[in-house]
Image: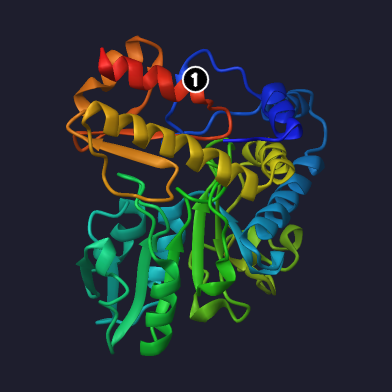
């Protein structure tokens, strides 16, 4: 896996993990520039200075995410969690509408549809989701990459099947944004958190909606959702934002201050370069597992590798300074920009031992 001097220089300047950290699917590491920005934001508030720069960070993050997603910033709403954004979409569906999902997808993508109580939620294996769209399917909701095992959905096939049957699409890029190139414009709605592959702090999530808002009602709208937020602090909002900002939630300002720097780094590295780096490391791990007689969950082209039967070793690996996850009995390793071939080989050696 070849990287450019610029890529390597940027990574070395930003990361110095004290462990072999292979757990980005849970939380990404914070770049040094992000840590510095978080500190600066805290000092700003501690000293009682105006917080105007922090509100500017929110808009800078919206614009940066829009560039990564390939959509205009006017289609991007800034919120706090995937579950909250899913809830807005769930609230827009008529009673009895069918929602097609993938079996055992991440809860935040699924649960708001279930708690409605009057929707028909149907789950099928991920590999069959495109062929399972049928007349009467109102919405297909799926993660671009599965949290549990890294399997990547065939989004192109899903998009075509949805178009054929008049269904809308909702894609969660939380385990993909930052390493897998996005084309959010191909789907009606999409979402992502920022604290995994985008290397940001916890507390932010972005929702992409159509230009006409796709029939969504901003049921969580507060003052920040007004066209003139500072004139919308008291009483009902008189005019909602004319952009996707009408779906914004009150921002966690410190988080956006840090995230702005994280997104800058992702853009400087380039998603294509990150993708090549991450997948090459994951493939190296897969090859090593084969040599050891282990078969991971098939997930070609993914930066996440999940190995059945080895999840119980997560504790001993952590004590040895190697951070991975135990998901449903599977050992899950996730490879990102700060990882190297030495990290892969260290994990393989530990599994051999």
Image quadrant where residue 235 sits: bottom right
Is residue 214 left or right of 107 when viewed as pictured?
A: right
Is residue 25 among the parts visible in the rendering?
no
Q: Position of residue 241 (x, y in %)?
A: 68, 70
Relative height, residue 334 to residue 129 (above, below): above
What coloring was used for the rendering? rainbow
Q: Position of residue 316 (x, y in %)?
A: 27, 13
The residue at the point 60 percent across, 42 percent down is 274
Q: Secondary structure at mark 1?
A: helix
Residue that badge 1 annotates = 342
Most distant residue in the front direction = 291
- Please state, as top left, top right, bottom left or bottom right, where the C terminus lies in the image: top left
Relative height, residue 139 to residue 83 (above, below): below
Q: Position of residue 340 (x, y in %)?
A: 53, 25
The residue at the point 26 percent across, 17 percent down is 352
Decide which of 285, 40 is in the foreground and name it.
285
Relative height, residue 163 to residue 327 (above, below): below
Image quadrant where residue 294 sits: top left
Relative height, residue 342 to residue 130 (above, below): above
For the image shown, how many numbered marks are present on the structure?
1
Disc 1 packing (10 Å; few <14; some 14–19; many ≥20): few
Decide which of 39, 130 is in the foreground and name it.
130
The residue at the point 70 percent across, 64 percent down is 73
Q: Position of residue 71 (x, y in %)?
A: 66, 67
Is residue 38 among the parts visible in the rendering?
yes
The residue at the point 55 percent across, 46 percent down is 179
- Please state, as top left, top right, bottom left or bottom right, where the N terminus lies in the image: top right
Image quadrant where residue 169 sits: bottom left
Decide which of 330, 251 is in the foreground and name it.
330
């Amino acid at each position: 896996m070849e990287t450019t001097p610029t890529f390597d220089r940027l990574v070395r300047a930003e990361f110095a993990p004290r462990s072999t950290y292979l757990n980005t699917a849970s939380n990404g590491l914070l770049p040094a520039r992000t840590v510095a920005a978080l500190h600066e934001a805290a000092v700003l508030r501690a000293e009682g200075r105006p917080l105007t720069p922090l509100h500017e960070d929110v808009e800078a993050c919206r614009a940066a995410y829009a560039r990564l997603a390939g959509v205009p910033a006017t289609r991007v709403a800034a919120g706090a969690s995937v579950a909250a954004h899913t809830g807005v979409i769930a609230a827009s569906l008529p009673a009895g509408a069918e929602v097609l999902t993938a079996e055992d997808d991440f809860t935040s993508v699924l649960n708001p549809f279930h708690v409605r109580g009057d929707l028909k939620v149907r789950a099928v294996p991920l590999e069959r989701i495109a062929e399972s769209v049928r007349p009467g399917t109102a919405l297909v909701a799926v993660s671009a990459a599965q949290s549990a095992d890294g399997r990547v959905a065939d989004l192109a096939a899903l998009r075509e099947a949805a178009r054929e049957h008049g269904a809308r699409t909702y894609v969660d890029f939380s385990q993909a944004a930052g390493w897998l190139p996005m084309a959010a414009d191909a789907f009606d709605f999409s979402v992502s958190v920022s604290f995994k592959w985008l290397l940001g702090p916890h507390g932010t999530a972005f929702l992409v909606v159509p230009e006409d808002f796709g029939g969504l009602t901003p049921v969580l709208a507060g003052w920040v959702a007004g066209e003139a937020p500072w004139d919308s602090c008291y009483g009902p909002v008189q005019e909602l934002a004319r952009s996707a900002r009408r779906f914004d939630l009150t921002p966690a300002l410190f988080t956006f201050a840090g995230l702005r720097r994280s997104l800058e780094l992702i853009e400087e590295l380039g998603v294509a370069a990150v993708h090549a780096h991450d997948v090459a490391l994951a493939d190296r791990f897969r090859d090593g597992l084969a040599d050891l007689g282990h078969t991971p969950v098939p997930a070609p082209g993914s930066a996440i590798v999940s190995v059945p039967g080895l999840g119980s070793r997560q504790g001993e690996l952590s004590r040895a300074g190697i951070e991975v996850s135990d998901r449903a009995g599977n050992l899950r390793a996730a490879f990102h920009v700060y990882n190297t071939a030495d990290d892969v080989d260290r994990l393989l050696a530990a599994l051999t031992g």
